[in-house]
Image (spheres, rainbow, N blue to C red):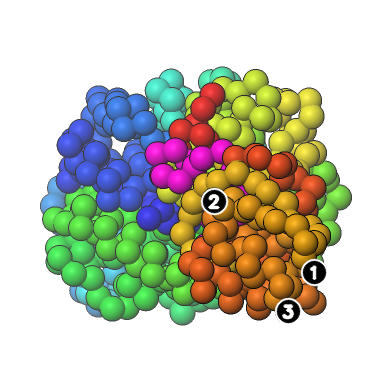
Amino acid sequence: MRTRTKIICTLGPATNSYEKIVQLIDAGMNVARINMSHGGYDKHLQTIEFLKKARKEKEIPLAIMLDTKGPEVRVGALPAPLVLEKGAHLKISQNPGEGEITLEPIQVIKDIKMGAEVLFDDGYITSKVVEKHPDFLVVEIQNPGVLKSQKGVNIPHAELDLPAVTERDIADIEFGCKHGIDILAASFIRSAEHIVTIKKLLAKYDACHVMVIAKIENALGVKNFDSILQASDGIMVARGDLGVELPLTHVPKLQKVMIRKCYQSFKPVVTATQMLESMISNPRPTRAEVSDVANAVYDSTSAVMLSGETAVGQYPIETVKLMRSTIEEAEKDFNYEELFYQDASRQIFNDISSSVALAAVKTAYSAHGKALIALTTSGFTARLMGRFRPVMPIIAVTPDEKTYHQLAFSWGTVPVLEKVKNVKEGVQRASCFALTHKLVRYGDLIIVTSGTPFGVSGTTNVMLVDNIGDVLVRGLPGQGKRCHATVEFFLSFDPEASYDFKGKFVVMTQCLEEYEPCLKEVKGIILQNLPDDTRSEDLVKQFAHDYKFPFLIRADAACTILKKEQLVTLDPVKGLVFEGIVESEEEMRNQVCRF
């Protein structure tokens, strides 16, 4: 079973071998995250090569995400860990003496105000500025702890003069672009201008296609969230640093607000940090962690992310499997159709692509469609459909390999890499894929979106309704087994005439009691009746029961579509009539997959 909510796994010492990567994919990984805060280029390049090899050999879409270190503030090098007692004063300067520290970059001390909080090591050691001088600060320690080199430093609410990207970030981005990353997660984004700066860098390295996901990790990021959202390609709710910079009690509300705004803006959103943290060292998570994953799904997050659990944890594969099963259970419970009609279906759009995507999802629900098929070059239409959170899978057929792998990150989307010449071929390829992978069944209704001219990005303006296979007639499900025969019509009755319907499918518009002698040896009945003609329906059901033949009622346009002596297959359970003989699963697959 495929989850609609996607799973991002951080690779590290526990999982960056080829064998482990394959196991992660089998367990449910959709996006592989490479954290540039750790490791060197040689190891990262090897990991990327393993990922590309694995996705090629397994013939699956897999997005590669590079996560930048970002303009962090950290404790400088210390000769030895520093033991800090409550109430002690600690000097922060450019040239620290014994028992003192420096910050990297030290220039930030000019932006730290008197009385400000300075938090060390993810907030485990708190302090307050009690002295401020041009070239140094003195803080008072609020709780005891041991401070080590390179530990993170947070100054809540301070507007630090930090660049959008550091020199190291620029080198990391160049490295990622050179080796074909699909997504860039940009750390410590504080304004929309930072996103613009990063996108200019990507353009410089001929990588405009790379999606930029803004990580919201501090108060400024929250303050400028709306403009950041519009400038970026998506958001990551990085709850770790966010919970240090802001009160922990604010994080759940912020998570829900950010997910909601992303959902409304057609942008993907990732819920990250400590989702199954205890599984770093334990084979089972806490109940609260499982609830956290499920609640993120109920909030309609696009993806959930594992960090240390898969990077350095003792049970990385088990963690992904458990996350996947948790998502599956949550998605079973969620009423996506109700969400659609309460929210998305009421929206009005000014652009054609969004209107077509909305119409496609509406039609899928009203016509009981089983899949949405988007013939897309850029992946934009598939992402639009994903915004509406449809219960049916979104099968995105694209000729572009970059789009193919990026769509592995998109909610509810199943990417298919195919170069097709026209809509008909695209529907055939998508139908074959969907049937082969058991996303649909033979005879199911599908809704297709495409564009004219075909194959041009941004031109989605066509929606059509089609079938999986050669469906001739649809009706209400009846009873009996699937079988084939030729068609005969019985549209009027002459008591003096003799009728031989033995072994035939008899098509009728009504059924009367006097028809019974003529129908004893039929192969099946296809009744094209009006909904209020329940008497005919009752008689057909009675005759079918007595003489053991299948039937179909309210068969729309059967008299017009079917032809005398035409060979067809009747599937009474699905309420369908197919062209030709398609009784076995192999025959169905062969018919759909004939190119």
Q: What element carries label 1?
A: loop
Under mark 2, the amino acid is: Gly
Q: Distance between the residues labelled 2 and 1?
A: 26 Å
- In the depicted view, which residue is nearer to us: 191 or 338? 338
Query: Mark 2 packing: few (<14 Cα in 10 Å), some, or many (20+)?
Result: some
> Which residues lie in the magenta part?
568-588
Q: How far apart are marks 2 and 3 (CA)?
A: 25 Å
- In the depicted view, which residue is nearer to us: 42 or 267? 267
Q: Which residue is drawn at 66% across and 59% down?
A: 526
x, y percent for residue 311: 24, 48
Q: Which of marks 2 and 3 is nearer the N terminus?
A: 2
Q: Can residue 158 be seen in this view?
A: no
Q: Which residue is drawn at 40% across and 39% down?
A: 586
Q: State yes or no: discs 3 and 1 in contact (Cβ < 8 Å).
A: no
Q: In which quarter of the image is the N terminus?
A: bottom left
Q: Does the magenta stretch include residue 578?
A: yes
Q: Name the residue under label 1.
A: 530
Under mark 1, the amino acid is: Leu
Q: Which of marks 3 and 1 is nearer the N terminus?
A: 1
Q: Mark 3 points at which residue?
A: 535
Q: Mark 2 points at which residue?
A: 503
- Give the number of the mark in front: 2 or 3: 2
Under mark 3, the amino acid is: Arg
x, y percent for residue 170: 47, 29
